[in-house]
Image (tube, coloured by chain):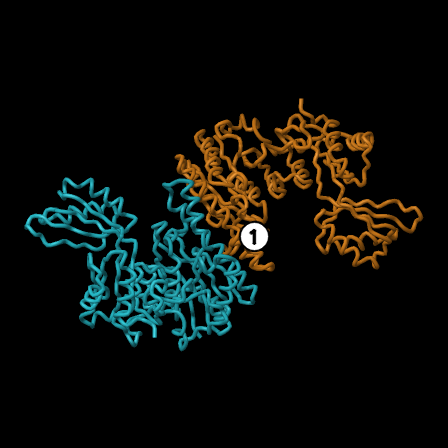
Chain colours: A cyan, B orange
Amino acid sequence: MALIVMKFGGTSVATVERIKNVARHIKREIDAGNQVAAVVSAMSGVTNQLVAYVREASLLHDAREYDAVVASGEQVTAGILAICLQAIGVQARSWQGWQVPILTDNAHGAARIKDIDGTRLRERLLGGEVAVVTGFQGIEPGRQRLATLGRGGSDTSAVALAIALKADLCDIYTDVDGIYTTDPRIVPKARRLSKVSYEEMLEMASLGSKVLQTRSVELAMVYKMRTRVLSSFTAPDAMKPTTPETWDEVGTIVCSEDEIVEQQVVSGIAFAKDEAKVTLLKIADKPGVAAAVFGPLAEANVNVDMIVQNLSSDGKHTDMTFTVQGTELPRALELLKGVQKEIGYFAVNSSADVVKVSVIGVGMRSHAGVAAMMFKALAAKGINILAITTSEIKISVLIDAAYSELAVRTLHSLYGLDKE
Amino acid sequence: MALIVMKFGGTSVATVERIKNVARHIKREIDAGNQVAAVVSAMSGVTNQLVAYVREASLLHDAREYDAVVASGEQVTAGILAICLQAIGVQARSWQGWQVPILTDNAHGAARIKDIDGTRLRERLLGGEVAVVTGFQGIEPGRQRLATLGRGGSDTSAVALAIALKADLCDIYTDVDGIYTTDPRIVPKARRLSKVSYEEMLEMASLGSKVLQTRSVELAMVYKMRTRVLSSFTAPDAMKPTTPETWDEVGTIVCSEDEIVEQQVVSGIAFAKDEAKVTLLKIADKPGVAAAVFGPLAEANVNVDMIVQNLSSDGKHTDMTFTVQGTELPRALELLKGVQKEIGYFAVNSSADVVKVSVIGVGMRSHAGVAAMMFKALAAKGINILAITTSEIKISVLIDAAYSELAVRTLHSLYGLDKE
């Protein structure tokens, strides 16, 4: 018998028919004697509609009112799921964030959960009742106004609730059946990982994997909450009830490194297409020039990722290359134009035709030569590396977009990730 | 300077564009120094969609969950209206029923308001802030679960809030510009009434006028809350700000009889088309037969309205005619078939081709001969009366549907209600 938090995202609850399917997933666990708290998102499309209303009302708007409006979507799903559960003989009640209560800070629209009082919920769970909790929201310290966590916040709600309830497992049901070594649409030989460490998952999330919200992984890591990613589209009867003995049989468990017995050196290959490269030609090679370039960008909230500065050939000038998000390229170029005089560069080149390919693995910490192996393999395929960044458990390279598929497939084979 | 509650129904807030229009109506009052609490319905169509979701989930459902789902509609409108007000420089905040709080009883889905604590709202109103309150909902005595008042409940929310805040006036903005002597689509000479008494309004509401919810009129009557019906589709600038001197210049005020100086004998002609007539032929003319007929109907919640029993010709048998709502006719016939043996009637006739025409006016109390005048005028036009019911301030007749327009126009002229 286990206490499980089961979270269902927008596509899993997009229609009443799908919510009925979700109810059957929950019934499977209740019938097996597990205790279940469910966390739900708004039906897919609803939050976008509500945000559109708010924007039509006024582009500049009171974040407290924005929260009051958009929090309503989850309220609807929670009530409907409770009804669907009751209809198949499972005791259930819906809980809005303020009813639990889930206490947040005052940062309306992007609030952080401060505390969850799970006392009343736990009592009900013990009696076999399913608590259906609205994701993405809580109530601010004054207990007057609703607060939302920002888009994708329901993953965080689920993990935070699992921590508060001391759950055995936080199951994130979504439209994919787990975390893969890379995108299976690009590499058919991609394998589902049965386990991945929090650190690796964090890198994958920040490198473009949209399966889990970054903040939820951070939270799970701090409190060591075992978090599993699995598909709500698998038939509810085709899955075994969750027990500590079987819970690594489906999906991917995000957990501590030390729970992963056979750790690969590299766990996955990520790639991000929404990168753009900017090169400043012939800028002065002197102290303070980096600050002059990146100061204005930072002030304008343009995130800079990879930075490469060439060696100076004449000791006076150099070229500097860096990457920004593709959507922010026009704004970055505009900003740089405005400060050309102060920085004193000759010209600026840019291209959105680049891709960042990353290999990720906690095994790198103890294995030397992973990077060298990577560079060698890419060179052998004639792929030019435009920039490099590394962390303790990740190596990223920037390459021409035309080579992205070749690079990913090459690296996937290179580190032994291919199926069979 | 006055304290006004302004209520806006579903069609008045159907789109963000219309909500902006509503904001301008409110701004007009605030700019004139009035204090305003606004009560809003869900955007038109939203509540129906939410009810449809609930029904799709399960036809038999927990009323508490139904309430949690359908209460979300008003929440959205309230937040958006607050944003629209702020955008045109009017201080505002949204209040959900539980935040005010509006306390109800436990009858989820059809709850009654027990108490409203207006303390915090009043403080804010004094500071010039508009309180935008969700209609149709409150929180049950345990302060745990949301409760809704039943369809159309926002009128009641508005009147109850006006009473709690000791408002000078409760303005119900809707899609018509007031209460008319009869439906202007049938009788072009129909006049807008500048005042109508609570009692007359109650009769009109129960006789088919859908402008105000019956319960809201009852409440207004008990607490003598002056309630005005007016159109939100009149351009906001085309209306004067509300002052005690001018508030009878637009719309219709529902108020105490004694506020109406020039009381007409008859104030209005109502007609209801959704009536059906049932005649039981040759039933026994003995004590207990009425109970035998109407008992089963009452148990099955079929409301019976007019009843006529013919004089017996042979001292043993008689015919009995009564009316039910048109939509309930099939069910009524089914029920009567089931108890034919016990009642012992010979046959049953029915027709949905009837209409109930009513003349309403508190002046009837002091004027004799109103009914006689009515019957004579209808007879002169060759209109046969199938059944009659009366109250202190109303006379209703059932006639063939074909004559409904003729009857309404005849009576409208007869009692001096025509324009000019």
Residue at the far left: name it. Answer: A315
Secondary structure of residue under mark 1: helix
Relative to B104, residue A266 above or below: below
Disc 1: which residue: B51
Image position of A280 (left or right of B9): left
Q: What residue type is labelled 1?
A: Val
Q: In which quarter of the image is the C terminus of chain B?
A: top right
- Image check: B270 left or right of A184? right
> How many other residues sit within 10 Å of disc 1, few (<14), some (14-19) or many (≥20)?
some
Say which residue appears at 46% left-offset and 52% top-offset. A73
| Depicted B259 relative to depicted A7: above or below | above
Residue B226 in sight here: no
Q: Residue at the spot x=65%, y=28% of the render?
A: B191
The answer to whether residue A342 is visible is yes
Residue B39 rendering spot, x and y as whole percentages: 51, 41
Q: In which quarter of the image is residue A200?
A: bottom left
| Rendering coords of residue A401 (x, y %) | 27, 56
Depth order, front residue of A317/B257: A317
User: Percent position (x, y) of residue B203?
Assistant: 68, 39
* Residue B123 in which image quadrant: top left
Which chain does tag 1 point to? B
Is A184 in front, or is A54?
Answer: A184
Q: Position of residue A228 (x, y in %)?
A: 38, 68
